[in-house]
Image (tube, rainbow, N blue to C red):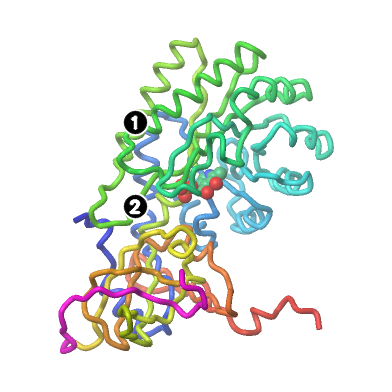
Amino acid sequence: MNKQVIYYPEDAVLRAVKQFETPFFLYDEARLRENCRNFKKAFSRHFPNFWPLYAVKANSNPEILKIIAEEGFDFDASSPSEVWITRKLGKTEDFAMSSIGMFTGNYNPASELKYAKDAGYLLNLDDISMIPMLQEIGVSEFISLRINPGVGKATIESNVFAGPNAKYGIPFEQAAQAYAMVRDMGVKRFGIHMMTGSNVPIGEKNYFGDIIKKLLEVVADIKEKTGVEIELLNMGGGFGVPYRPEEDSLNMEEIALSVRKAFDEQCEKYGLKEPHLMAEPGRWITADMGFLVSRVDVIKDGYKKFVGIDASSNDMPRPSIYGAYHHVSVIQARESSGGKPETVSIAGKICENNDQLAQDRELLHCEVGDIIVIHNCGAHAYSMGHNYNGRLRHAEYLLRIDGSFAKIRRAETFEDLYATILS
Ligand SMILES: Cc1ncc(COP(=O)(O)O)c(C=O)c1O
């Protein structure tokens, strides 16, 4: 039983449900800071100039971003609004490499690239066809290119971001041609990036080392064919977290060591000057600090037993989009409610049958009014939320290190939902 998966801050949840209307997201600041520190420590040990970014798409609440920035991370932004929110945080003077981070979009028009560039982001272009856009927006001194190294891995098929079916990155066979193009346009400093999959299975212990080896082969090929030396290597995010109690946690120290070995081996083999290492985790930093806390509204005992809660898949769409598994804990409202554990599915209120946040789970007996805590909801959860069926998205609270709560986002109202209507 992995304690990291089954843990939730029970006392805080109990205090919170007495004060706040459910459902809500509860984020644990202590866990968030610990994740940031452990990630940085693992890599900085082997790479003194390691440059960590945080993938804003995983959880873009500005209070969360501020904490991550305080822990020494810059940002990986994927859209103009992510650029905008990071610029509003007020941290400007101490960004590493005099940049706020890297902008990695895909299929962007020149206007989006210009927006990110003007905000101080280092541009990471997703395709050769985007290179001519640099003429339009002004050629930067420093450019990174996203390479598809030909292979990718993820726990869920649609989270595989490299290989022949992926829509991302410059095929590695075209890499030298792409760097020659940017060099000929006047670019003087070069980065290389890959992001080959999200939530790479934890058991794939050699994956990151192997994929870095492959990317360094590409770096060597670029140097040989064009003379371009790569100064920054961004290995992307994708570090897996355990969602099921029987899964192990990722050993980040081991991953960092395997990346170190890959660098040593390839830089020596190809006579490369070592590029600075960057990474841009999202999930590993924020997933397990977040919980979706909800209350049982309805119990339906039909062909199956369904426990209807006041949150729905619009709050946390991962199970409905990919059939993702999230661990669930039950807090019985009345000590006397007892009852044997039973197999139930947890249902939301959306008119789609995939609005089941957990299916066929053996859970403590539930009654109306009990609290359901859904784990691992700090990453790709609220940020993937939507308003289908006119369902509102709910509040976010931060459990501070001193045990107090900060409301960091209010729940939406009907007026919010219709705020963009013109008549
Ligand atoms: C370009 C890029 N970088 C980083 C991430 C973060 O991935 P993860 O949350 O799996 O670490 C993503 C996720 O989609 C991504 O697309």
Q: Is residue 142 above or below residue 321?
A: above
Residue 403 place in picture, x, y as percent: 32, 71
What is the spatial separation of the Cα atoms under label 2 and label 1, in whole angstroms?
Answer: 25 Å
Q: Quick check: 395 left or right of 112?
A: left
**In what element is the residue under mark 2?**
helix
Q: Nearer the viewer, residue 398 or 170?
A: 170
Query: What residue is rendered at 79% in x and 37% in y?
Result: 133
Residue 34 place in picture, x, y as percent: 34, 52
Total count of labels: 2
| Residue carrying label 1 | 206
Query: What residue is rendered at 65% in x and 37% in y?
Result: 126
Q: Residues within 10 Å of mark 1 (few under 14, many from 20)?
A: few
Q: Residues within 10 Å of mark 2 (few under 14, many from 20)?
A: some
Q: Is residue 322 above or below residue 37?
A: below
Figure quadrant of the C terminus: bottom right
Residue 217 place in picture, x, y as percent: 51, 19
- The answer to whether any part of residue 54 appears in the image is no
Q: Is residue 231 magenta?
A: no
| Residue carrying label 2 | 34
Residue 371 place in picture, x, y as percent: 31, 80
Q: Earlier in the sequence, mark 2 or mark 1?
A: 2
Kind of residue at badge 1: Asn
Q: Is mark 1 within 8 Å of ligand 1?
A: no
Residue 113: image quadrant is top right
- State the extent of the magenta-drawn residues as a range: 335-354
Query: What residue is rendered at 36% in x and 87% in y?
Result: 298
Whether tag 2 and tag 1 are in contact, CB under 8 A, the answer is no
Q: Quick check: 184 left or right of 257?
A: right
